[in-house]
């Protein structure tokens, strides 16, 4: 049985974040709060995404929107997906950084 | 190398009312005025020296913390994370902008000292940035899109109750 947090039923501490580039929403994402970068104590996933984006972009800003302690991976994914769906309903398009993910799901 | 600044607000509702154009402006000034003078623009071409400014809502934190540099060879990136105490910026005695600039330039002086940059070169940039952004509508803070988190969490909670 899988014991990593790709297993949707596994409990963990998550957060959902957003990233803005030049004051426009770029993407929503979720991060495992139990995986922090040792040197910075930031959630690794968020740290990594902002770090890579700032190589080629300006005004990169990441924000933890909500902390989700003791929930399943599936729960955290659902929160992330609801955020993306809400954005799509309001703005008529997906956040740019979430578009590729959505294409994968459609296959 | 080129220099960049990004921001991470590491807990909910801990944002500064600071436009993201301001760290961009500071980075531009450093690239234009500091890096050439210290030959840092020609050091490690195609590399990025990145500074991530982080904060969270822990009001008990009162000290700045600048983490050790991390080098990412594959991404050609030297990355610093600097934690700024939330209470140092968001206090009512002075404007957030004044406090933010003070904190950021204190961080810069420490980070760039690793590259032998003299603090006095940063002081003139700080003054320039301050004069440019204060009361300038082009650098005014703009609120970002706020998702309806309460409604979203309610829907997800309902879904997971039904599934149980």
Image: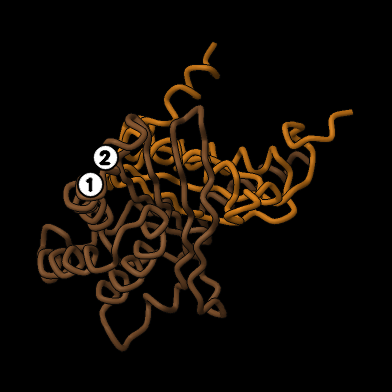
Chain colours: A orange, B brown
The correct choice, above or below, for B10 with respect to B93 in the image is above
Residue B106: image location, x then y, percent: 36, 70
Disc 1 target residue: B31
Mark closest to the chain's N terminus, 1 or 2? 1
Q: Residue at x 27, y 84 (%)?
A: B94
Q: Position of residue A34 (x, y in %)?
A: 71, 50
Q: Secondary structure at mark 2?
A: loop
Which image quadrant: the C terminus of chain B?
A: top right
On whether disc 1 and disc 2 are found on a single subunit, the reply is yes
Chain letter for mark 2: B
Location of mark 2 (residue): B41
**Residue B86's mark?**
none
Which residue in the rendered view is the most extreme toward the bottom? B93
Q: Looking at the image, do the residues carrying marks 1 and 2 touch, with CB atoms under 8 Å apart? A: yes
Camera-side residue of B83 and B148 = B83
Whether residue B133 is situated above or below residue A54 in the rendered picture: below
């Amino acid at each position: 049985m899988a014991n990593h947090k790709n297993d949707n039923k596994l409990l963990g501490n998550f957060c959902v974040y957003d990233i803005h580039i030049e004051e426009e929403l770029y993407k929503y994402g979720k991060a495992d709060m139990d995986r922090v970068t040792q040197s910075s104590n930031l959630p690794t996933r968020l740290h990594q995404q902002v770090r890579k984006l700032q190589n080629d972009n300006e005004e990169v800003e990441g924000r933890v929107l909500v902390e989700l302690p003791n929930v399943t991976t599936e729960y955290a994914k659902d929160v992330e997906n609801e955020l993306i769906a809400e954005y799509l309903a309001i703005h008529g398009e997906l956040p740019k950084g979430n578009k590729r993910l959505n294409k994968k799901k459609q296959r | 190398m080129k220099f960049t600044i990004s921001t991470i607000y590491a807990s909910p509702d801990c944002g500064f009312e600071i436009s993201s154009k301001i760290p961009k402006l500071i980075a531009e000034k450093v690239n234009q005025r500091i890096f050439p003078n210290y030959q840092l623009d020609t050091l490690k071409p195609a590399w990025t020296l990145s500074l991530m400014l982080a904060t969270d809502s822990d009001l008990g934190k009162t000290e700045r913390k600048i983490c050790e540099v991390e080098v990412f060879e594959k991404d050609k990136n030297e990355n610093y994370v600097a934690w700024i105490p939330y209470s140092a910026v968001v206090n009512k005695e002075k404007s957030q902008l004044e406090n933010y600039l003070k904190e950021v330039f204190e961080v810069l002086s420490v980070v760039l000292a690793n590259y032998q940059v003299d603090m006095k070169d940063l002081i003139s940039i700080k003054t320039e940035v301050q004069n440019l952004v204060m009361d300038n509508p082009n650098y005014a803070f703009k609120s970002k899109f706020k998702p309806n988190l309460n409604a979203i969490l309610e829907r997800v909670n309902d879904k997971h109750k039904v599934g149980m």
